[in-house]
Amino acid sequence: MQAEQLKLLVIDALEDIKGEDIKVLDVKDMTDVTDIMVIATGKSNRQVKALANEVVMQAKAAGVQPFGVEGETVGEWALVDLGDVIVHVMTPQTRLTYNLEKLWSVPDNSEHASAE
């Protein structure tokens, strides 16, 4: 399954059980580890676990075996590694603390550009 199809599968899985604030980051030019990161919020530890589980179940149903799943037992932050797509599901406080969107965003150098 190609990265774009996998991304759509992940988004559908997260939306199926009400994942919130779903963001997709294209990181292929920043790391060799993955091409796409999908970040979502679950309202509680229980929902974080359920969201990660839903991603795993739908990926397996589509013939994609996750390389790994981390954090699903605690539920504050779960990571599902699908190779070309890595999924982070976090509680609101954990997401605010780690701010992965900022960490993996392309720096905006426009304000530092020299005037010509």
Image (cartoon, rainbow, N blue to C red):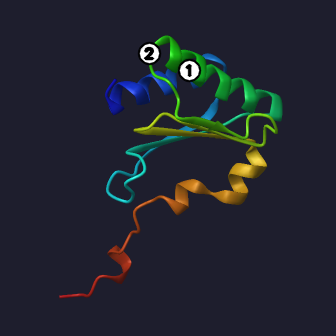
Residue 104 or residue 68, whichever sits in front:
68
Q: Residues within 10 Å of mark 2 (few under 14, many from 20)?
A: few
Which of the 4 image quarters holds residue 17? top right
Please state which amino acid type lies under the numbered disc 1: Ala
Q: Position of residue 46 (x, y in %)?
A: 82, 28
Q: Is residue 41 above or below residue 109?
A: above
Q: Earlier in the sequence, mark 1 or mark 2?
A: 1
Residue 32 or residue 43, whichever sits in front:
32
Q: Is residue 15 above or below residue 20?
A: above
Secondary element type, mark 1: helix
Secondary element type, mark 2: loop
Which residue is located at x 67 percent, y 58 percent? Answer: 98
Judging by the rendered image, the residue that carries numbered circle 1 is 13
Please state which amino acid type lies under the numbered disc 2: Gly
Q: Residues within 10 Å of mark 1 (few under 14, many from 20)?
A: many
Which residue is located at x 42 percent, y 25 percent? Answer: 8
**Between marks 1 and 2, how big is the CA–CA gap?**
15 Å
Left or right side of 32 for 90: right
Left or right side of 106 for 46: right
Q: Position of residue 61 (x, y in %)?
A: 50, 11
Quadrant of the snapshot with the N terminus:
top left
Q: Position of residue 95 (x, y in %)?
A: 69, 50
Q: Position of residue 30 (x, y in %)?
A: 37, 60
Judging by the rendered image, the residue that carries numbered circle 2 is 63
Left or right side of 17 for 74: right
Residue lying at the far top of the rendered structure? 61
Q: Is residue 65 above or below residue 78?
A: above
